Image (tube, rainbow, N blue to C red):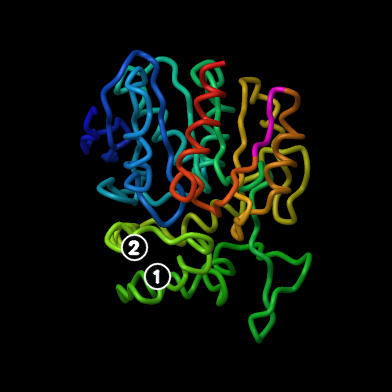
Amino acid sequence: MCRVIYKKIALPNGEEIGYREREGGKDAIIFVHGNLVSSKYWERFMQRFPENFKLYAVDLRGAGISSYNKPIETMRDFSEDIWLFSQEMNIKEFILVGWSMGGVISMQLAADHPDAVKKLILVSSPSCKGIPFTKKDEEGKVIPGEYWKTKEEVFNDKVQVLPIVYALRSGNREIMKNIWDSAVFNYKKPEENYYKELIEDIFTVRNYPDCAWATQIFNISHFHNGVVMGTGEVDKLTMPVLLLWGEYDVIVKKEYSEETAKEIGENAHVVVIENAAHSVFIDNEEQTLKVMLDFIEK
């Protein structure tokens, strides 16, 4: 079995990007992680892939061992880092796999550089309209249909943002594990030692709550998402697209995958991963791998 090696590379924009690499054949796959984690979440899954694939998993700017010299403002800041990474690594064409927030980053990258992305896999991803944060009342209850419109409002969200900011700044592992128990691993918990490693990985992150704001203003659909009008760039996603959703996911709804697939068109389809929540490639590694490989090898 080929080992996954952890490295770092300097980009022309002044950032350094950490990445995990697994040797293999000529077909390259780039994995993009989600919010509040690093490429570590992909590491075990990468070991399961056939050795005829060359695999990379990047640490987003401000996560893992990547630098955070310039704070991000939009998802394009992240996607352009990955594009520069692919150019520095001389990866001409690749399959792109994005999990959670990594899904919207991957959509942006694929829309900007469609000739380089052979196939796109969106795992437990927000919609192509993003997921704007809804306003809350004095008691912290959601006000349906009303959204935060400024960065300051998002940064001061008492329900979704400030508890995570507090846990990160105070180094409170217990609070973060409680959040992960209820949101990420709400269906199935990883084995104890591995789970501790995954929780510890969260505290490498320095790009939150900037990511919350970037998600707020991401929208490549043809519709308004309550905060910003869509750019229509979804039309550029002409490559084959697979969308995976875990049947017990409480972070993103199935309808997000369905509306994204509808916006993309006939080249996109949704598959439900059984016995899995938000982290389908950890909860149900076997089905997730099979569905991905069936799609890739068509």
Q: Seen in the image, is 186 located left or right of residue 129?
A: left
Residue hosting label 1: 177
Q: Seen in the image, is 29 located left or right of residue 291?
A: left
Dividing the picture into quadrants, the one containing residue 152 is bottom right
In percent of the image, x 54 and y 57: which residue is there?
Answer: 213
Residue farthest to the bottom, as pictured: 139
Q: Are marks 1 and 2 in contact (CB under 8 Å)?
A: yes
Q: Quadrant of the C terminus?
A: top right
Q: CA distance from mark 1 to mark 2?
A: 6 Å
Residue 91 spot, x, y in % from top left: 36, 18
Residue hosting label 2: 199
Q: Which residues are magenta?
A: 267-271
Picture layout, residue 66 above or below residue 248: above
Q: In the structure shown, which secondary structural element does the residue marked by tag 2 occupy? A: helix
Residue 143 spot, x, y in % from top left: 74, 73
123 or 155, which is in the foreground?
A: 123
Q: Seen in the image, is 62 located left or right of residue 289?
A: left
In percent of the image, x 66 and y 41: which residue is there?
Answer: 128
Residue 193 spot, x, y in % from top left: 27, 61
Picture layout, residue 59 above or below residue 241: below
